[in-house]
Image (tube, rainbow, N blue to C red):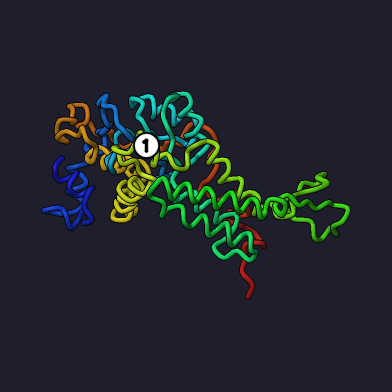
Amino acid sequence: MTGFVSWLMGKDSQGEHATSSGRAFRRDTAWCWNIDPAIAPTGEIYDQVQVDGIYVAGLCALIASVGGKPIALQWAGSENQTAWEALFCRIPEPKVVVMDGGAGAKAAITVAWPGVRVQRCLVHVQRNLRKYLTSHPRTDGGKALWGLGMKLTGITTRDQAAKWLGLLNDWHQTYGEHINEKTTRAQTLDADVPKWVKPKQTWWYTHHRLRSAYHLLARLIRQNVLFTYLDEQFDALGIASTTNPIEGGVNAQLRLVMRHHRGMRPAHQRRAVEWWCYLNSPGRKDPWSLAKPAHWQIAPPPTSDPEDNGRPALYDTHATAEEGLWDRKGWAGRSHP
């Protein structure tokens, strides 16, 4: 067990880590994959919890973290509301949750943690703005709004936040009519109609990407999730303004484990994620305490073909007449001189 965990969390290959051979190491530690290193709930109430998801081997690992330490893990097919609720229900409601703004997580918070305050990751807000404006906007309005967006992560005081809000209001005073301009289908050639316009749509906002970027910021301000980390009641808590601690302290480390052990089967990749999260969780115990007698039982290899169910084979190597792959006789089977 100790050698298995040491290898899984390290960067050596099985052959390099083993005292004898890689094959012997795999045989001796095969039972270790049966252990489910689940993070046990501690019941502790945290000031702030960061949540994020990372896709591994076709599934999404939803992770809740405190200070770069995982406190809960939930596997799901996607970042949907049901999966997030299953994760949140195992953790007492914190004072603040820092998140990237996924729709599933936002909906789950209203159900599982109705009284929690939300801080949107400012780095993700900037990424969303870049999606609408690009990194090099060509219009004056786009350049001015992108410049405001780039200043978000540099705001550290309430005075700076108030000044930024004033600048955003000034921007709207200048470009409000501009982003409300409309274009009609009647005044546009068919070849010039944007691809995203629906067939029966008769008009659209001329500067819809610039308008969407502004309304993204305006919506976050109305929801009061942009500057939660500067709220006076949280001054002593040091609330983070981004999800960098979980992305750099957890997700980046999980990707490193996957890179060190490329080629693992999907089930083993997911088990490696579980082991890393467990070993770095606040309530971790000695890995040997998780081992049970049932874990030593290795399932024997199948003695028969699992596809041998009495039905005709869907894929086979046998020659069939339908494909013209039989031993030919007569004149058709003779070779020409």
Image location (x, y in percent) of residue 305: 41, 38
Q: Quadrant of residue 52?
A: top left
Q: Give the percent coordinates (x, y) of residue 10.
A: 21, 52
Instruction: Name the foreground residue: 183 vs 161.
Output: 161
Quadrant (top left, top right, bottom left, bottom right) of the N terminus: top left
Where residue 154 sits, quadrant-wise, is bottom left
- Report the residue at 31% width, 37% height from top: 301
* Residue at 32% across, 39% down: 235
Asked whether 16 or 250 is in front, the reply is: 250
User: In what quadrant of the picture does the C terminus appear?
Assistant: bottom right
Quickly name the residue at label 1: 232
Examine the rendered structure and indicate whether residue 242 appears above or below residue 297. below
Amino acid type assigned to the residue bearing label 1 in the image: Glu
Report the side of 73 relative to 132 (left or right).
left
In the picture shown, does residue 286 fall above or below 4?
Answer: above
Dot 1: element: helix
Within-10-Å neighbours for mark 1: few <14, some 14–19, many 20+: few
- From this viewpoint, is residue 59 visible? no
Relative height, residue 7 to residue 103 (above, below): below
Please name the residue shown 20% across and 49% down the image. Answer: 7
Residue sitting farthest toward the bottom: 337
**Residue 223 percent coordinates (x, y):** 53, 36
